[in-house]
Image (spheres, rainbow, N blue to C red):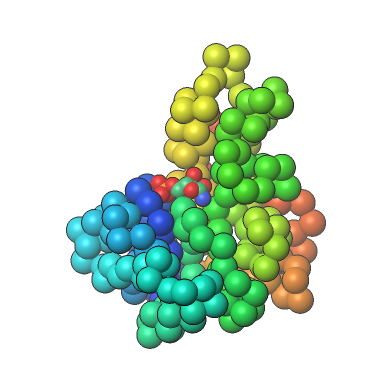
Amino acid sequence: MNKNKIPVVVLISGRGSNLQSIIEAMQHQQLDIDIKAVISNRPDATGLEKARAAGIPAITVDHQQFANRHDFDLALQKSIDRYHPELLVLAGFMRILGEDFVNHYLGRMLNIHPSLLPRYPGLNTHQRALDNKDRWHGASIHFVTSELDGGPVVLQVRLPVLEDDDQESLAERVLQQEHKLYCQAIQWFAEKRLILHQGQAYLDGNKITQPVIMDAKLDRNLTS
Ligand code: GRF
């Protein structure tokens, strides 16, 4: 672990359990990041309380206050750029971002999505996996590009769908894994091991042609 902590801004829309796990890993010195601010597009996002409890500035840019997506994106960008982040972490951020916004942060914006992309971009991923009787499900970390949930996937966790799973039980098991998964990808980025170059993701200088798979059974130690 190096001592240079990169400035990070986290975007949320809701409960912020991923945010909480990132905050805790940061507090335990497992991540070389400094979360400068947490920004929500919804004033009632409970994740804002989690940020405040950790002493992190918690800000709302309410999308409902703007006439159109472009104006919202510009206001959001302005709020973010005050903190000069090297990395923007989307953690349950539920607004579609416009092309200008995405290009502004290209290569320095990660998202977590609760499915094995490219399967199930968009919403209701757990129910769709159950409806299709998938044997495997999981979560993905990807660089954000202007294609919805379509940027290069860098890391995934896979877990088996159990016979008696319903949407809630599956979502809960995936969520537990998401927390470890996101911390791993963020730390790779902070260590400059994970980069996006000309639309292609690289880890340790190698093209990521297939996402790295984290085994749900392994509790990997971030510092190893
Ligand atoms: C997670 O399942 C994440 O994959 C998806 O939205 C959910 C956010 O949960 N993008 P939380 O707010 O981090 O608890």
List x then y, in percent, for residue 159.
Answer: 60, 31
Residue sitting at the far top = 164
Q: Is residue 25 above or below residue 176?
A: below
> How many numbered marks, from 0 up?
0
* Image quadrant where one finds the N terminus: bottom left
Is 196 placed left or right of 175 in the picture?
right
**In terms of depth relative to the viewer, which is nearer, 184 or 175?**
175
Tell me what residue is drawn at x 57 percent, y 49 percent: 113
**In terms of depth relative to the viewer, which is nearer, 82 or 45?**
45
**In terms of depth relative to the viewer, which is nearer, 68 or 214?**
68
List x then y, in percent, for residue 158.
Answer: 63, 36
Image quarter of residue 110: bottom right
Tell me what residue is drawn at x 64 percent, y 32 percent: 128
List x then y, in percent, for residue 177.
Answer: 50, 40
Tell me what residue is drawn at x 47 percent, y 39 percent: 175
User: Does any portion of residue 214 appear in the rendered image?
Assistant: no
**In terms of depth relative to the viewer, which is nearer, 30 or 35?**
35
User: Does any portion of residue 210 appear in the rendered image?
Assistant: yes
Tell me what residue is drawn at x 52 percent, y 27 percent: 167
